[in-house]
Image (tube, helix red, strand yellow):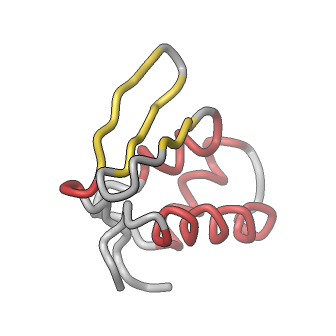
């Protein structure tokens, strides 16, 4: 995945509550509660990072290897995409 990951800003509403980000899909009304690494991933998807850059930043932040994180990150990014919260490829 070499594309830059970007949020579909017109497809959701979000609010920060303490250590949590709550994201609501405007299309479906579904809510997503993002804490810990999910919140970190969401915050790093800022329209400037590719998958590789996202993994590198997460690995540095959490003291893990990129290989350890890749599967979970890919699954989460795919879930965000399926929910319509990310710009399409």
Front-most of 53 and 83?
A: 83
Q: Is residue 44 left or right of residue 39?
A: left
Q: Tell me the residue at 56%/38% (across/down).
A: 34
Q: Tell me the residue at 18%/56% (across/down).
A: 10
The image position of residue 48, as x and y in percent, is: 29, 63
* Residue 78 placement: quadrant: bottom right
The image position of residue 38, as x and y in percent, is: 59, 45
Q: Is residue 87 left or right of residue 19?
A: left
Front-most of 72 and 8?
A: 8
Q: Is residue 1 left or right of residue 64?
A: left
Q: Is residue 78 depicted above or below 29 in this figure?
A: below
Q: How many marks?
A: 0
Q: Is residue 26 left or right of residue 42?
A: left
* Residue at the left extreme of this rendering: 10
Front-most of 20 and 73?
A: 20
The image position of residue 4, as x and y in percent, is: 34, 74
* Residue at the right extreme of this rendering: 68
* Residue at the front extreme of this rendering: 28
Q: Is residue 46 depicted above or below 23 in this figure?
A: below
Quadrant housing the C terminus? bottom left
The image position of residue 66, as x and y in percent, is: 70, 65
* Residue 72 placement: quadrant: bottom right
Q: Tell me the residue at 37%/51% (across/down).
A: 25
């Amino acid at each position: 995945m070499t594309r830059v990951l970007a949020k579909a800003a017109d497809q959701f509403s979000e609010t920060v509550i303490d250590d949590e980000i709550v994201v609501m899909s405007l299309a479906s009304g579904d809510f997503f509660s993002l804490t810990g690494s999910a919140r970190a991933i969401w915050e790093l998807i800022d329209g400037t990072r590719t998958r590789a850059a996202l993994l590198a930043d997460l690995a540095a932040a959490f003291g893990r290897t990129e290989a350890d994180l890749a599967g979970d990150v890919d699954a989460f990014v795919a879930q965000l995409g399926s929910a319509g919260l990310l710009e399409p490829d």
